Image (cartoon, helix red, strand yellow):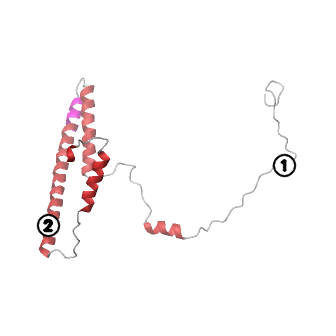
């Protein structure tokens, strides 16, 4: 370290301040508004398309491979289940593998899990709902008062002679 000082938690703040001073004192290169040459833009677009195509090809190849594995597991499960004495452990392992592959297949084919896709209101509907005044009538709040002839019985004890007992 500088000045022969070891880096410890006591002098970490000092080293941090020194580093920030050096970092922020360096001149920042000015941003120029010179446009890129057309060949560079075309080359960048071509590279981006090639990467997207490569990713799509990999995704499609992987999807085919996962579906083949699912078919093999389905056949193995069918074969094991139709045996005279099927092995429960092997069936469970095959079912677990099928579940994992099914999840991969769902992701690769860009499908949603049932119940997770919620429909969102369109922006136009949301804006109209916020900007339009409500046309519902204003309800008055009134207090309900029991009539005078209504007697309430509150028992002091519960037993055979009380009305609630």
Instruction: Label the magenta part by its dominant secondary structure.
Output: helix
Instruction: Please indicate whether residue 120 sits to the left or right of residue 19 in the image.
Output: right
Mark 1 or mark 2, whichever is nearer to me: 2
Outermost residue to the front: 3
Q: Which mark is residue 81?
A: none
Residue span colored magenta:
74-81
User: Could you tell me which secondary element the residue under label 1 belongs to?
Assistant: loop
User: Could you tell me which secondary element the residue under label 2 belongs to?
Assistant: helix
Residue plotted at (77% across, 52% down)? 144
Instruction: Please indicate whether residue 25 sits to the left or right of residue 150 in the image.
Output: left
Residue 81 visible in image: no
Q: Quadrant of the C terminus?
A: top right
Q: Nearer the viewer, residue 138 or 79?
A: 138
**Distance in Å between CA atoms under marks 1 and 2:** 85 Å
- Res 124 → quadrant: bottom left
Q: Nearer the viewer, residue 4 or 66?
A: 4
Mark count = 2
- Mark 1 vs 2, N-terminal side: 2
Q: Is residue 75 magenta?
A: yes
The residue pinned by badge 2 equals: 46
Residue plotted at (17% across, 56% down)? 55
The residue pinned by badge 1 equals: 147
The crowding category of the residue bearing disc 1, from other C-alpha atoms within 10 Å (few below 14, some 14 to 19, many at least 20), is few
Q: Is residue 2 magenta?
A: no
Vertically, is 27 above or below 76? Answer: below
Q: Nearer the viewer, residue 5 or 131?
A: 5
Residue 83 appears at what percent x and percent y?
22, 26
Residue 66 appears at what percent x and percent y?
20, 45
């Amino acid at each position: 370290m500088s000045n022969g000082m070891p880096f410890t938690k006591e002098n970490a703040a000092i080293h941090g301040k020194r580093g920030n001073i050096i970092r922020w004192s360096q001149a920042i290169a000015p941003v120029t508004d010179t446009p890129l040459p057309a060949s560079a833009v075309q080359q960048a677009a071509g590279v981006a398309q090639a990467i997207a195509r490569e990713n799509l090809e990999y995704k499609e190849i992987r999807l085919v491979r996962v579906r083949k594995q699912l078919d093999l597991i389905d056949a193995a499960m069918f074969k094991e289940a139709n045996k005279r004495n099927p092995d429960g452990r092997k069936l469970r392992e095959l079912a677990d593998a099928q579940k994992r592959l099914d999840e991969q297949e769902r992701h690769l084919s860009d499908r949603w899990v049932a119940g997770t896709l919620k429909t969102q209101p369109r922006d136009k509907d949301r804006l109209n709902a916020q900007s339009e005044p409500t046309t519902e009538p204003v309800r008055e709040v009134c207090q309900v008062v029991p009539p005078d002839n209504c007697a309430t019985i509150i028992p002091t004890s519960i037993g055979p002679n009380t009305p609630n007992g």
